[in-house]
Image: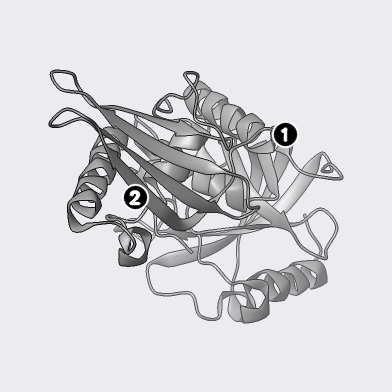
Amino acid sequence: MTPRFLLSTFAVLALSPAGGAQIVVPTAAASAPAGPSYADMIDLVLAAPVIADATIRSTTRLKGADIVGVPAGIERLYIEADVTALIRGAGGLPPQIGYLLDVATDARGRTPPLKKTRVLLFARPVPVPGQLQLIAPDAQLGWTPAIDGRVRDIARAVLAPDAPPRITGVGQAFHVAGALPGEGETQVFLQTADSRPVSLSVLRRPGERPRWAVALSEIVDDAAAPPPRDTLLWYRLACTLPPQLPARAIADLAPDDAARAQADYGFVLAQLGACGRTRPTR
């Protein structure tokens, strides 16, 4: 069991405003059969310096100064867990870790049994050896093979050298009308966090379905295609792009061309579909 002085020190570090205090309450998403959405899980992966597969060894109910600010109906627990695998994290982890978890109680004021529960933790290190701080209220997920596999796939995609960049905004949009009625091409350049090129293109031909693609280079060629759903590139677009082109993006276009560019951009959003995020962004 963690010594009392160390537990109190960790509680201050993990829950003080300077440490980014979070009240961690298990959510329905963590236990629902379908699991969290792809967008929810990728939000967690992107935000977590440490991702660990662990099994809860013991829980200790905290009292007194360690539960200041905890609302009614919530119990603050100190969790000790055995690390099964480190999915992401520089410097590794010890075989056993500790962290704080705030858990909703049932109608009788009891917390659910957590001992021997296998979980996935999305956390950050704190200046206490062997201790972690969960990054968000839903940063402990119940382990399943499907969720574990998806988290590992996301982590590999995020850390890959060719991972698509984070989209920060929409740049300039262009539309060129074709020789035939209804024919034309729209190109929308996106702004990225590291200034790498990303652009959307929509091609319309009479009698054919519109075709769209995303390019990750300066040149849009035949290899460009729409991103498959539930991939990092899809997430970057579906969860970031604004609902319509900003006025500045089409300010230099003729009114008809601006309207066509706006319509083609709307077509891309419809093809991407909803982001599917259910957890609040921070």
Who is closer to the viewer here, 260 or 107? 260
Label 1 amino acid? Pro
Please determine whether, in this image, residue 28 is positioned above or below residue 77: above
**Disc 1 on helix, strand or loop?**
loop
Residue drawn at x 50%, y 80% as measured from the top left: 69
Answer whether residue 277 is visible to the viewer in this image.
no
Mark 1 or 2 closer to N-term?
1
Indicate the position of residue 66 as horizontal and vertical percent values: 63, 75
Which corner quadrant of the image does residue 242 belong to?
bottom left
Q: Is residue 92 above or below residue 223?
A: below
Residue type at the position of mark 2: Thr
Q: Residue at x 37, y 59 (%)?
A: 249
Q: Residue at x 19, y 22 (%)?
A: 209
Q: How many marks?
A: 2
Q: Residue 267: percent from the left, percent from the top?
A: 23, 38
Does the image show residue 221? yes
Q: Residue furthest front?
A: 179
**Residue drawn at (48%, 74%) of the image:** 70
Of labels 1 and 2, the one closer to you: 1
Q: CA distance from mark 1 to mark 2?
A: 29 Å
Q: Is residue 195 above or below residue 212?
A: below
In the picture, the quarter occupied by the N terminus is: bottom right
* Label 2: which secondary element: loop
Task: Classify 10 Å Cα crowding around label 1: few (below 14), some (14-19), many (20 and above).
Answer: few
Residue 278's tag is 2
Q: Position of residue 244 (x, y in %)?
A: 27, 55
Using the image, tell me which numbered label, if any, was put on residue 161.
1
How many C-alpha atoms fall within 10 Å of the one at disc 2: few (<14), some, or many (≥20)? few
Instruction: Out of 142 and 217, give the one closest to the viewer.
Output: 217
Left or right: 69 in relation to 106:
right
Residue 270: give x, y in percent of width and height: 24, 38
Asked where in the image residue 280 lies, by quadrant, the reply is bottom left
